[in-house]
Image: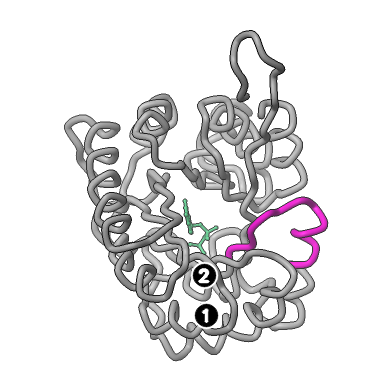
């Protein structure tokens, strides 16, 4: 919500980034959009449902995932970026500079970067950049992640990266606490509880908790069953996190279930 105490209240809803994984092995939509036509059709659906950005990725970064070489990643994402970039803002979800370069040449406007190392490339290419916090790399990040104060440490890391990128000339910098990237369920919940601290840094905040494992764990516990609910069955928790994030001042939520998340944005602003 914006506006002075005496002036009219102006509601500025948060925005939604739709997830489009062109991979065989993503934890939720893996294998569903490997065919470029199916992927572009899904991207168009996400736009219809209200996504302001479609995030195209060609490598799963779920815990334990095997890395993918840049050539294969480019082969997967390029036709999809090309098919969507004149219809919506496309972000390229990659940690590989070669992939970011060709995706931007094809029309991607934002580099969504789990390595948090591609800020100078974003400056060189004149595109936006998302710095995500991750502890280690996807293969090992869930091996006993440890923090003193997770909110303070993640925040300090992101602010340092964001300042460096802005100094290098990136005009659009986002910071993202990296829910699930080297974090236990408790760390994820502490980061969500502390989102206002990230928002208070003044950098626009993006949160991506959609369908992640900790939500499966919490949903199973509330259903009174052992283990995890499957990713497709984590929508309620995902939308609850989105509503909370928007309430805390987060401007962008990355989501598989775009329609429900847009509704949360409209309700909470
Ligand atoms: N999480 C994933 C991928 N990209 N980008 C941002 N900015 N924030 C996130 O939290 C984030 C992200 C992992 O989720 P997903 O893409 O759905 O699965 P996978 O890595 O298995 O492809």
Q: Which residue is mark 1?
A: 103
Residue 97 appears left or right of 143: right
The C terminus sits in image quarter = top right
User: Magenta stretch?
Assistant: 43-55
Q: Give the camera-side residue of 259 and 123.
A: 123
Q: Residue furthest left?
A: 148
Q: Nearer the viewer, residue 11 or 212?
A: 11
Do tag 1 and tag 2 residues touch (Cβ < 8 Å)? yes
Residue 57, percent from left and from top: 53, 70
Q: Secondary structure at mark 1?
A: helix
Q: Residue at the location (17% across, 32% down)?
A: 148
Tag on residue 92? 2
Q: Is residue 189 visible?
A: no
In the picture shown, does residue 2 fall above or below 113? above
Q: Position of residue 64 (x, y in %)?
A: 37, 64
Q: Residues within 10 Å of mark 2 (few under 14, many from 20)?
A: many
Q: Residue 268: where, in percent of width, then height?
A: 67, 26
Using residue 21 as the reference point, say whether residue 140 is left or right of it.
left
């Amino acid at each position: 919500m914006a506006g002075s105490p005496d002036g009219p209240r102006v509601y500025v809803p948060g925005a939604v980034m739709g997830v489009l994984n062109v991979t065989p092995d993503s934890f939720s939509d893996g294998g569903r959009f490997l065919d470029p036509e199916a992927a572009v059709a899904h991207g168009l659906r996400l736009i219809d449902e209200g996504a302001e950005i479609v995030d195209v990725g060609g490598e799963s970064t779920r815990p334990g995932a095997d890395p993918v070489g840049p050539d294969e990643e480019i082969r997967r994402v390029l036709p999809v970026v090309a098919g969507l970039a004149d219809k919506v803002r496309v972000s390229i979800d990659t940690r590989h500079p070669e992939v970011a370069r060709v995706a931007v040449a094809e029309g991607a406007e934002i580099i969504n970067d789990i390595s948090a190392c591609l800020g100078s490339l974003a400056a060189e290419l004149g595109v936006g950049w998302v710095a995500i916090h991750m502890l280690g790399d996807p293969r090992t990040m869930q091996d006993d992640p440890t923090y003193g104060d997770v909110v303070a440490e993640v925040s300090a890391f992101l602010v340092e990266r964001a300042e460096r990128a802005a100094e290098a000339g990136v005009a659009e910098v986002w910071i993202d606490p990296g829910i699930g990237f080297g974090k236990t369920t408790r760390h994820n919940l502490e980061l969500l509880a502390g989102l206002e601290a990230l928002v208070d840094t003044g950098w626009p905040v993006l949160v991506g908790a959609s369908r992640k494992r900790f939500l499966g764990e919490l949903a199973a516990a509330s259903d009174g069953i052992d283990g995890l609910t499957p990713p497709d069955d984590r929508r309620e928790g995902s939308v609850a996190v989105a509503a909370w994030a928007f309430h805390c001042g987060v401007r962008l939520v990355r989501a598989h279930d775009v329609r429900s998340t847009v509704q949360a944005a409209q309700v909470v602003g």
